[in-house]
Image: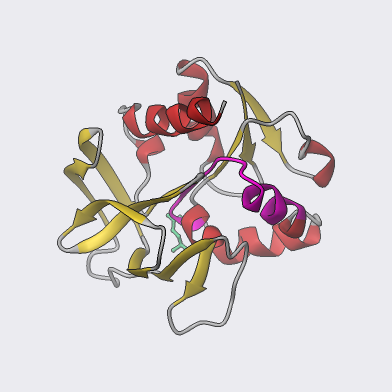
Amino acid sequence: MKIGVLCLQGAFLEHEKMLVSLGAEVKEIRTLAHLTDDLDGIVLPGGESTAQGKLLREEGLLLPLKEKIENGLPAFGTCAGMILLAGKLLDDDTVHLGVLNAVVKRNAYGRQLASFKIDADFKGVGKVPMTFIRAPYFESVGKGVEVLSKVDGNIVAVRQNNILATSFHPELTNDLSVHKYFLDMVKARG
Ligand code: GLN
């Protein structure tokens, strides 16, 4: 199983380590030439979505990646990666990949609660340790989007067919279960 990890900016190394420890082969995606047809899935890491969106455009990766995800390539976005996937950002006309039928609020927790850790339920997995860093959450989700986790009443993890997105950073904990959930999605696709 070959999983691409978008390595333009942010916490990509941590994702790579987790994927490798679960037995996946990792391919770093930095340019359009890396976005080959043999990928079984792609991970979009956390970091800063404006910077990542700019680099995606500069590298000519934005539309080809969008097309691949729309054609069924399993994609997993964490934090900034979730913002890249979003169909709409709250009070903001910016759209990056726009493949996920949901409205995302950036920096949703404000300055007071910019970063925190919590254990919360993740549907189909159980309790998962979650690390939030200037995190977004889902303001609302549309048709075809399944809510997998809520923290304090706010939606922090969803799935829409081949797309998985989390507000939090599972790659910054020692818990592999959310990455395993994603690899199971990849396997199920065949
Ligand atoms: N606040 C960041 C953004 O808007 C996301 C933070 C993160 O990925 N940890 O891009």
Q: Quadrant of ligand 1?
A: bottom left
Q: Relative to residue 181, is residue 161 drawn left or right?
A: right
Picture quadrant where residue 93 is located: bottom right
Q: Relative to residue 159, is residue 20 drawn left or right?
A: right
Q: Position of residue 101 (x, y in %)?
A: 47, 65
Picture quadrant where residue 126 is located: top left
Q: Nearer the viewer, residue 151 or 125?
A: 125
Q: Nearer the viewer, residue 108 or 76?
A: 76
Residue 72 falls inside the magenta stretch? yes
Q: Nearer the viewer, residue 57 or 150?
A: 150
Q: Position of residue 100 (x, y in %)?
A: 50, 60
In this view, 75 is above or below 16? below
What residue do we see at 32% from left, 34% from top? 173
Which span of residues is magenta-colored? 64-80
Residue 113 falls inside the magenta stretch? no
In this view, 81 is above or below 108? above
